[in-house]
Amino acid sequence: MELEAAKMIGAGIATLALAGIGIGLGNIFGSYLSGALRNPSAAPKQFTNLLIAFALTEATGLFALVIAFLILFT
């Protein structure tokens, strides 16, 4: 029973990274929107950077979720 409890605690700690991912995504899109409203002509040039930042941030969240599932189901 102690091993199952340790797995649950470990998976819970691994999913704490998902809260940081949500904050990071909010910062990324909020900064892009703020910049686009200040200088609309520069917004299309920065859209590629927005997508790259989104993909890297989301990949980090997926890695954290995979680690949590590995802890639970192995």
Image: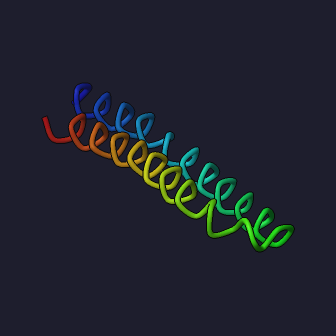
Q: Quadrant of the N terminus?
A: top left
The quadrant where residue 42 appears? bottom right
Residue 21 position within the rendered picture, expressed as x and y whole percent measured from the top left: 54, 48
Pick whichever, 66 or 41, lies toward us: 41
Q: Residue furthest right?
A: 38
Pick whichever, 32 or 30, lies toward us: 32
Pick whichever, 50 or 64, lies toward us: 50
Is residue 31 shown left or right of residue 8? Answer: right
Residue 43 position within the rendered picture, expressed as x and y whole percent measured from the top left: 69, 68
**Is residue 56 positioned above or below 48 on the image?**
above
Is residue 21 shown left or right of residue 1? Answer: right
Is residue 9 shown left or right of residue 46? Answer: left
Query: Residue at (62%, 69%) from the top-left corner?
Result: 44
Is residue 31 shown left or right of residue 18? Answer: right
Residue 55 position within the rendered picture, expressed as x and y whole percent measured from the top left: 43, 53
Query: Residue at (82%, 68%) from the top-left corner?
Result: 39
Q: Residue furthest left?
A: 74
Number of marks in picture: 0
Pick whichever, 31 or 48, lies toward us: 48
Query: Residue at (58%, 44%) from the top-left corner?
Result: 20
**Is residue 69 positioned above or below 22 on the image?**
above
> Which color scheme did the rendering employ for the protein?
rainbow
Query: Residue at (82%, 72%) from the top-left corner?
Result: 37
Q: Quadrant of the C terminus?
A: top left
**Is residue 5 positioned above or below 45 on the image?**
above
**Is residue 68 positioned above or below 28 on the image?**
above
